[in-house]
Image (cartoon, helix red, strand yellow):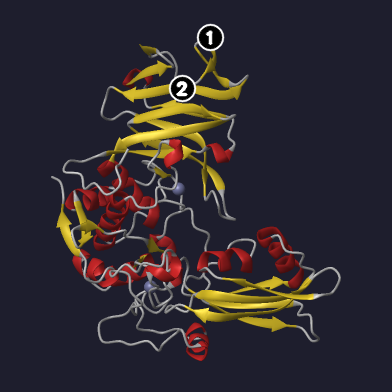
Amino acid sequence: MLKPGVIPSTEPSIRVGIVLPKDRQKKITAFFSNMCDFEMAVDALTFSTCEVPSILFKVENNGISFSIDGKAYEKVHKVVFRPVKKTAHITLDPVISGREFHWRKYISVRVPDKVEISLRGNALLVVNELPLETYLTCVATSEMGAACPSALIEAQTVVARSWMLANVEQKHVDLGIDVCNDDCCQRYQGLNNLTENSKKGAESTRGKVITYNGEICDARYSKSCGGKMETFENLWEDTPLPYMQNKPDMPEGHTVPDLTVEENAKKWIMSTPKAAFCSSHTVPENKLKKYIGACDEEGEYFRWTVEISNGDLSANLRDKLGLEVKDVLDMQIRKRGGSARSLELLIRYLDFEDKEHETLVYKDYDARRVLHPKFLYSSAVTIDKIGSGTIPKRFVYHGAGWGHGAGMCQIGALGMSLKGYTTEAILAHYYPGSKYTKIYK
Ligand SMILES: [Zn+2]
Ligand SMILES: [Zn+2]
């Protein structure tokens, strides 16, 4: 596993969670490129075997059960496959994609190198351990689709490498893994979408990261900023990161009005600023499918409209905030960040005895959870009430962007690369003041 705050001088190995205990998965099948390519360890017992093309693992009787060529194994705690050939790979099925999202689905994932299948509680934990650079060739394409221009793939690879090695978030350290396979960390679907282009992207940036003051940048990124980037301190912790600024996602020289002013924010969200790198003028949204990974739901990224009934919204507030909400009376964003994302959302509602209450939601992430049961694309929204009388029938959100909007805007970086900007220029634009540098060979 990676050590926080340590800059490696050689390529490290990392551990990626493919199936997590919270998936409550009880079965998984491993298909082998060729089983002779692997050495298999069952708890303390190690052996080579070439007998079967696949093995089904099941959780039962407080252990893992499986059989190989008629021989049954029971109450096993851990199975490890180590490759003896470089080209060896294992296909794991099923694996969740979009774990926390409304479009979640099951896919099969082909992974290289070492695979561990173990028991956690009464569910499976499946871990893929592999060299960082191999992981990165897979992440760049899983995140962006295989048809991307090379400057975008390179920038995405450098950002993914930096984020991994900065290793600040450590969301799953209790499971003994560095990252999970999904959008919660970085989307990793093994060798599924690997192309020659993505291999080149990783090879040409091997060992390269962005740093600031001698430390690797916590290079977070999101799908679309909406035209202006958000700051680190507005989204996560109070301490600002100097390389994440409220900066227009536009060529040098363009300015954007102060979006913390409500009137400016409303005008901004209802307009489509053509100069933005992530604007639908720069990257037509019907062309995005060609570049964006296959798992994404089709949608409008830069400017969009979503509606919700008062009934569905009230149910979501009961669910997410544990409040006794019968009807929502009004919602207002009272404070915004520099990208127009919500920093303070006021909700007025009636309880089941028709008494009126108010509540405040502070973070962008929480506003997105609260505004829609399917996690709203962004909290940079205007909120319109529909219906006569004091209780609105529906609420309509007009929104800007997709995701938190800090650091690299992936669609904006696509726009830049299509316009001919280099990898260095893209990194310097999204992480101002950072240094592009090589830390290992
Ligand atoms: Zn994660
Ligand atoms: Zn953008």
Q: Is residue 114 above or below residue 184?
A: above
Residue 70 numbered tag: 1
Give 84 or 149, whichever is nearer the viewer.
Answer: 84
Place of residue 68 in the rendered image (x, y in percent of width and height, measured from the top left): 49, 13
State the separation of the CA atoms marked 1 and 2.
20 Å
Front of the two marks 1 and 2: 2
Viewport quadrant of the N terminus: top left
Secondary structure beneath dot 2 equals: strand
The residue shown at (69%, 65%) is: 317
Residue 313 appears left or right of 37: right
Query: Label 2 belongs to which residue?
Result: 78
Q: Is residue 142 visible?
A: yes
Residue 136 appears left or right of 261: left
Mark 1 / mark 2, whichever is N-terminal:
1
Secondary structure beneath dot 1 equals: loop
Q: Is residue 304 visible?
A: no
